[in-house]
Amino acid sequence: DTGVSQNPRHKITKRGQNVTFRCDPISEHNRLYWYRQTLGQGPEFLTYFQNEAQLEKSRLLSDRFSAERPKGSFSTLEIQRTEQGDSAMYLCASSSSPFGAYFGPGTRLLVL
Amino acid sequence: GQNIDQPTEMTATEGAIVQINCTYQTSGFNGLFWYQQHAGEAPTFLSYNVLDGLEEKGRFSSFLSRSKGYSYLLLKELQMKDSASYLCAVRDSGDYKLSFGAGTTVTVRA
């Protein structure tokens, strides 16, 4: 297993467009997290799945954001009607225990 | 909520020791984590403390005092490749999400 993977690695879009990111966790991990990170800041929690159930969404996650994890495997994060303030690194992480989560390489989004 | 503070930047010489402090104020506590993040890359897990005391792992050690809301990461025998951002993160009373500090950028000079 090569760890958590994310696609695409980079995305440039125009304001108002929709974008979708994919995360493939480590195969035996039942917990999956999405974080957002801007330059000079630590990652901010967005949402958490245990298997296919989305158990928590941050207040940072406006109605334009939606995440899914069908069948408890890969997850997608969709942003509708993107805004320039959405420009950030979107990080996915997974874990199988209360110990440290393992992060993917991230998707860097730039909204023009 | 969580309030996590760590210094913004630190500079040290190759071969030296650097200590990165982290203080936190939380409504609940279920573990403190340190991650390393090189520029443009994902955070990688370094250490985990849930009980008071020192955890040693090679050149890296992490200390926790729950009563003081304080942790530090100690990096020994610094190497140029240790130049990175070091993130302190606290898990709340649940057993899942982490709240991160802004990170400490460590620069190692020859």
Image (cartoon, coloured by chain):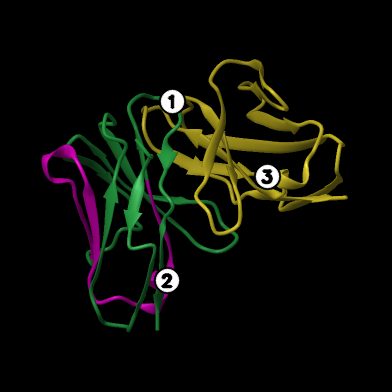
Chain colours: A green, B yellow
Which label number is shown at residue B6?
A: 3
Q: Which residue is mark 1?
A: A99
Q: Please tell me which residue is depicted at 86% across the width and 37% down the height of the picture.
A: B15
Whether residue B69 sits left or right of residue A107 in the image: it is right
Q: Secondary structure at mark 3?
A: loop
Q: How far apart, in angstroms, are the residues tagged by discs 3 and 1?
A: 22 Å
Q: Please tell me which residue is depicted at 68% across the width and 45% down the height of the picture.
A: B6
Q: Are marks 2 and 3 on the same chain?
A: no
Q: Secondary structure at mark 1?
A: loop
- Farthest residue in the left direction? A71
- Chain of the residue where label 2 is placed in the rendered structure: A
In the rendering, at what x and y percent does residue B99 appear? 48, 42
Q: Is residue A3 above or below residue B107?
A: above
Q: Which residue is mark 2?
A: A87
| Labels 2 & 3 near each other (Cβ < 8 A) | no
Q: Amino acid at mark 1?
A: Phe
Q: Amino acid at mark 2?
A: Ser
